Amino acid sequence: MFAHGNENMMGAKIEKGTCKVRVFRYDPSKDEKPRYETYEVPYLVERAPDGREIPMRIMAVLDYIRNELGVDIAYRATCGIGRCGTCGVLVNGEPKLACWDAAEREMTIEPLPNLPIIRDLVVDRRPLEEQLKNVNPWLERKKPYTKFPEEFRPEEIPVLKDVFKLGRCLECGLCYASCPLVERSPYVGPEAITHLTKFTFDPRDKQEDRLTIALSKGAYYCTTCKRCSEACPMEIDPLNALISLRGLLVEAGKVPSTIRDALERIYKYGNPWGISRSKRSEWARNLKIKYASQVEKIELLYFVGCAASYDLRAQNVAKAIAKNLNTLGIDFTILGNEENCCGNEVYSLGERGLFEILVEENLNIFRKYGIDKIVTTSPHCFNAFKNRYGNHKLTVLHYTQFFADLIDKGKLKFSKKIEKKVTYQDPCFLARYNNILDEPRKIIESIPGVTFLELRMSGKHGICCGGGGGRMWYEIPEEQGRLAVDRVKEAVEIGADILAVACPFCLLTLEDAVKTTGNEDKIQVKDIMELVAEAL
Amino acid sequence: MPDEVYEKEVLIIGGGIAGLSAAYFATKQGADVILLTKGFAGKSGCSVQAAQFGGGIIFLPEEDRYAYFKARLFNFMADQELAWQLIKGIDEVNPARVLEEIGVLWRRRDDGSILVTAMRLNKKGEPSLPYYLWSEKMGDTAKTISSALRQEILRRGVEILDNTVCTKLLTKGGEVVGATAYDYEQGRFILLKAKSVILATGSAKLWKYHTEARESVGEGYILALEAGAQLVNMEFMAYHDAEMVWPWSLHLGNLYLYTHGGFGAAKDLTGKYKSFSPSKFYNMKGEEFSITHKLGERMAIELQIQKGLARKDGGYYVSFEGRDPEFIEEFFYQANALKHLGIDISKDKIEVRTSCHNMIGGIKIKPRTAETGVPGLYACGAVASQCLGLHNCMVSASWAANSAVKRAKEIEAPTIDLDQVKEEENRVLSWLSRTKDTVGDGIPPIKIKRKIMDIMWEKCNYMKCEEDLLEALQQLRMIREEMMPRMVLRSNTKRWNYDLVEALEVPRMLLCAEIIVTASLMRKESRGYFQRKDYPETDDKNWLKNIVIKFENGKLKFDTVPVKLTYVRPWE
């Protein structure tokens, strides 16, 4: 405690409250099945006069339960200061280091997913270590080591410093535990990829052999859902490491043929399907729509995107958005056949060169027409323009933000009811990449007659539909069960009639999964804009 | 019957940098090696907490080596030949080179030269006593080293048994022939036959506040003692002076702030070398006090404690006023912890406390061979007297590996006394029948552990005195006579029965604590890190002696042996 009891010289005080914690208990050698036990524990927060709060750590709660309450829960605890990386647990659905992260007043503490359970919160680290071994996580020197200290050219120093940022990895496995692919596919996982990337960029290493390993261990399996980077306690960004690695694979020409073809089609035709540019705005043919080349000034650009332009099912979303904007009297314009791929997946696939070309072309088009405000169909296009296109002065919105804003302003009123139970698949590029969680829900919940149901894994914990990262053009034959199938099953389990989406890739993958699981009579997949169009 | 039997040439017990290095050196010589560790190899013990690597002393100029040598004599308690050989070993083994070869990147300046930081500045304001190398981020150094060593030995085919605690060293005819161990993940009792055994079990967390991982409780000292080795200088330990106090933490771990050293990384605009140490110390009243004292920083704090203006477990503060926050962010190893906690180093005063850092004494070993006097048993790293410090861990590990491999190549596979194994298996596994369900309510081991740590913290801390030490002995005896017999486990599960691990720890922790207190009582003087309120003067006339401990006829024997003043005498 502090020098003067509960107070210290800085005037900071310790406040004592209560923490309610549910702990997962399971002894595979004795118990038939897991159970949860609830405890009450003192919740200590240090509060500084300027309002800063420093709560107790999660591990302190576990210690209290074991040592003061006398309950023999099993958990790992070694260094206590975020160095050894062994104390990972799942707290309220998020992977955390127990010693490093703050406890919350209400917690459910569970073992990390994707690893076999030894007892209670202790998981077996062996699969994690095996995966790491798969990428040869040691230096394989290009040239023999001859003298100490090793001599580096000055230009190698910044590269080494960058590479060694990846070396801060604690091997805690939180990223591995959050990856939806490691258990269902041969993907080696984000931790191993981080180490592989570190060695591949290390100028001392042999490097080329690493790329073959990268390819065989699933460098193209990742859907870029970003759960790994969200989980990393050292802010290493394993996803960025993967994309950098893909960049090297592209440079070395080691890209799977279906992905290479998709990239070539984007380059030639401005869309990954390879359909002619002249057909890009065919979906809009009989609609009341303004084209950029025909107007004086553009108030709002509706950026349709490749999927909603060319895919027959996704075109219904574009039509719904156009209809909704028109019904609400919003002045908008589309680029028509001048619209080009946004390049978000090109970036995720590591094709930096093509991505830079697309950025330049698209920014030129926007500049040409004096565009300053864009609303997109797809969260992917939204993310590209907002976060990956560098410094620009454009206001970029996803349609959920735009329409939620209309609700706030009282401009969106519904005249019809939809008496259905509706649940919602959070797109990765809205929820995790851009923190957009409330707006889509606001729209759905304001439709009269709708009962909104939350999926168990939703919001920032949501699980990818499997469509991102280039996976629309790359099949993993060994994948046990598509991600989309699990999402549909979850939606059916909670009793939803409609699985609402806000992304064309989610729309396509989830609808496909509904068909393959034979759930067409139980559930429908609809874009939020389609629901709005129905109810307006 | 053991669940698993291993037969290897070299068995290494301990997975910190000493153990990993020993495995590296041994396997490089073609030995068949197995390593077992209570925690995780490369993630446990105090190794992973270390911020910097002392292998930089290879750059020490001749004129500074003598000063370094004298400092490592710990006020003349050390084995001078051992201290000298450890320094020679740096040149011969060059641990920094060993690590660089396997991929550890030592921090470079922008011009590519290697960054070596110094303990202090000389009169000209230049770094003097160059000492430490850093990995890319100072503070990650030990992690980087551990990780690189672990991967390297895995690549070379060393088998690693994590979460496996050694329960006993097996002996036959006065020689060590193997060990028994308990894998507490799966609840398996394991027999390991080995021609050579290297103990690398590190230091001891016997005090309430101590910079060690939870599982480092000093069992290694007692395992060695039980096998016939000797302990020396157990009353000497180093202390930290600025560990961050977190009031809500039920001693999670220990984040300490460096109060000295690190000079040479960068200069400010006036040409002065920047520092990442706290700039000011404040006592309970808010008065500034100086941390400098000829007997070290811990003594400076002790003076405040004696005036009632600080406590050993808190009540004094540090600040970083005037320090460059960018420099701290770039170079200071706790920077990300401070940021994570929302501490603003430009204005906050951080409450800190003292803590025990490392045992200086330990298993008595022979210089250059790391022999313990028991054939087949070698020791290296912090468990061996004087071998603390990552660079010394590695030098002593290379000695131990060389001796271990040499012996393994020369002798036949030893035979094991199976009765000894059976007795040990029974001792370990019979705990599973001592649960509250079978014998009724009792005391869980963790409570006894914490009581031992409380007693040591209160009565056997930095400033000792006869009254406290006698009180400590009495309370430890009470634990032995009243609490230990009532120790029960909370469950008989085979899966992660940490109560069982702790039940095995308790008797050895108790013995280790008793040894430290008894040796402290014997030494009636003050000397460097060993301070007594009732004997404040150094007594070279009567106490240029080491206290050596061994088991004789099943009882502890404490002897005093005059220090051999091989190279330097105190009056020179």
Image (tube, coloured by chain):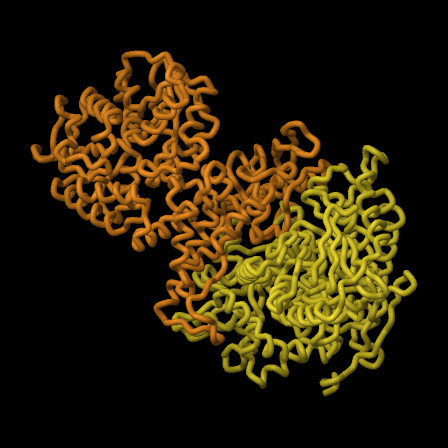
Q: Position of residue B188 (x, y in %)?
A: 72, 45
In-front residue for pair A200/B249: A200
Q: Is residue A40 above or below residue B532?
A: above
Name the residue rendered at 60%, 57% in the picture.
Answer: B42
Name above or below for residue A488 compared with residue B488: above
Chain represented in yellow: B
Residue A167 visible to the viewer: yes
Relative depth, front residue between A252 and B346: A252
- The residue lying toward the viewer, choosing from A299 and B30, is B30
Q: Is residue A47 visible?
A: no
Q: Nearer the viewer, residue A377 or A353?
A: A353
Residue depicted at 72% across the width and 59% down the height: B204
Residue farthest bottom in this picture: B572
Chain A representation colour: orange
Tell me: A317 left or right of A286.
right
Furthest residue to the right? B553
Q: Position of residue B285 (x, y in %)?
A: 63, 58
User: How many numbered callouts?
Assistant: 0
- Quadrant containing the C terminus of chain A in the rendered view: top left
Q: Residue furthest front?
A: B412
Q: Is residue A92 above or below residue A235?
A: above
Q: In the rendering, at what x and y percent does residue B47 appear?
A: 62, 60
Horizontally, residue B428 falls left or right of residue A396, namely right
Percent coordinates x, y for residue A375 in the rendering = 24, 33
Q: Residue at x 47, y 67 (%)?
A: B107
